[in-house]
Image: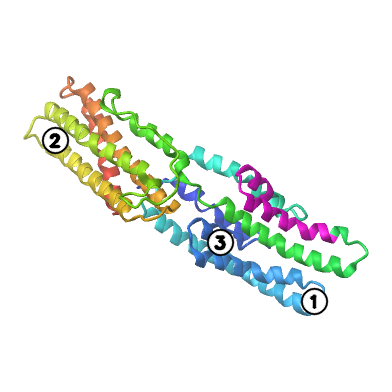
């Protein structure tokens, strides 16, 4: 689907991190983890490594000086590489079926990720994960955050034991960078989309007349395997696909009947609008069949698989909403033959045609 300029800009903001000294590789860590690209993730760590080694070997200038020189060169390379990677990323996103999150969702995501900034504060870098582990709740993150704080505590308490303090602070510096990496990984870890299933179901049901749909009970499904048919974690999506498959023919038939009343065949306008509806028919069922194939082939739960199922539902629902919008305009317009109102219908059909064809183009 067509992405807006705003969506392209916001998905490219990670490039700015490459211009920040000492943290220039973290943009690659972020983007590599977000899109499950191990190469980008490893590249980000590689850019950070010389600077980390330079700090750890600071008392020995013969070792730390070359490390800082390599780190400076790496930071310059990371700037060039960030633009190259972002170009490839934007190209992939433009050609994908991924439905970008709304502005409100982006703002909520940023607000919920502000705890990561704590990881950049020496002495307190582990407290961000402690906070996240408490609020998630996730005991592993909580304990991990405490682990990053222990070297600082030992170093401060080890007054009078210079060797102990030296080793503790060396470990603390190393853990400082590790905690930053880990915080970024945790913050960009995809959330289980089943948290949003109720909202998806409600949006789908909003397109169905109250007397035309059975109430669907939304339950918290456990993420487990089912030996027969679709795994239980994805039963929700099977129900939604079945419901959309049931109501689409009715929506399509209703729209075609209104087109025939407004533009009786064999008018050229009728043929043109019929082709648009036919395109939506083809796109709808190709997306629906793709969704069913994913359900059939899935043998275990995966957030990435669920993300794709969610996108399929959104696309299918948008096609039905498009038909509803067309039908509504045709009902209002049907008594206004040969008036300027034809322009509004033309615009609606052109918009609907572009939307459906942009989806099918990426199949």
Q: CA separation, marks 2 and 3?
A: 52 Å
Q: Earlier in the sequence, mark 3 or mark 1?
A: 3
Residue 56 location (% of width, % of height): 75, 70
Q: For this view, does 54 lie left or right of residue 217?
A: right
Q: Secondary structure at mark 1?
A: helix
Magenta highlight: main SS: helix
Q: Is residue 90 above or below residue 243?
A: below
**Which residue is the site of mark 1?**
61
Q: Are marks 2 and 3 in contact (CB under 8 Å)?
A: no
User: Residue 28 has which mark?
Assistant: 3
Residue 129 image offset from top left, x and y in percent: 66, 51
Point out the residue furthest to the left here. 266
Q: Is residue 230 magenta?
A: no
Residue 208, position as x, y percentages in the image: 29, 29
Q: Mark 1 and mark 2: span between their CA atoms?
A: 80 Å
Q: Within 10 Å of the Cα at label 3, are there few (<14), some (14-19), or many (20+) other Cα atoms?
A: many
Give the secondary structure at mark 3: helix
Highlighted range, magenta: 129-155
Which one is earlier in the sequence, the residue at label 1 or at label 2? Answer: 1
Asked whether 232 or 290 is in front, the reply is: 232
Question: In the visual, does 54 lie left or right of 140?
Answer: right
Q: Is residue 67 left or right of residue 251?
A: right
Which residue is tagged 2? 269
User: Closer to us: mark 1 or mark 2?
Assistant: 1
Q: Is residue 21 visible?
A: no
- Disc 1 crowd, CA 10 A, few/some/many (<14, 14-19, 20+): few
């Amino acid at each position: 689907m067509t992405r807006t300029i705003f969506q392209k800009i916001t998905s490219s903001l990670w490039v700015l991190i490459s211009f920040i000294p000492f943290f220039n590789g973290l943009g690659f860590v972020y983007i590599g983890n977000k899109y499950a690209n191990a190469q980008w993730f490893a590249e980000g760590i590689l850019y950070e490594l010389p600077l980390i080694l330079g700090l750890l070997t600071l008392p020995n200038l013969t070792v730390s000086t070359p490390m800082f020189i390599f780190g400076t060169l790496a930071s310059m390379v990371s700037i060039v590489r960030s633009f190259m990677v972002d170009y490839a990323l934007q190209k992939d996103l433009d050609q994908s079926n991924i439905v970008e999150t709304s502005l409100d969702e982006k703002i909520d995501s940023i607000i919920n990720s502000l705890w990561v900034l704590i990881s950049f504060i020496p002495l307190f870098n582990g407290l961000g994960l402690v906070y996240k582990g408490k609020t998630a709740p996730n005991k592993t993150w909580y304990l991990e955050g405490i682990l990053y704080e222990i070297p600082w505590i030992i170093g401060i308490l080890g007054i009078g034991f210079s060797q102990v303090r030296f080793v503790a602070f060396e470990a603390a510096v190393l853990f400082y960078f590790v905690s930053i990496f880990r915080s970024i990984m945790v913050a960009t870890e995809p959330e289980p989309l089943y948290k949003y299933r109720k909202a998806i179901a409600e949006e789908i049901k909003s397109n169905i007349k109250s007397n035309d749909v059975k109430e669907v009970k939304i339950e918290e499904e456990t993420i487990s395997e089912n030996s027969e048919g679709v795994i239980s974690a994805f039963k929700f999506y099977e129900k939604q696909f079945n419901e959309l498959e049931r109501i689409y023919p009715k929506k399509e038939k209703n729209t075609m009947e209104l087109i025939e009343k407004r533009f009786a065949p064999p008018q050229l306008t009728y043929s043109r609008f019929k082709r648009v509806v036919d395109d939506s028919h083809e796109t709808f069922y190709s997306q629906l069949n793709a969704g069913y194939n994913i359900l059939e082939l899935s043998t275990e739960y995966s957030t990435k698989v669920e993300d794709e199922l969610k996108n399929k539902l959104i696309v299918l629902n948008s096609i039905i909403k498009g038909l509803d919008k067309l039908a509504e305009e045709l009902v209002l317009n049907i008594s206004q033959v040969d008036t300027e109102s034809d322009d509004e219908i033309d615009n609606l059909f052109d918009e609907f045609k572009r939307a459906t064809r942009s989806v099918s183009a990426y199949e």
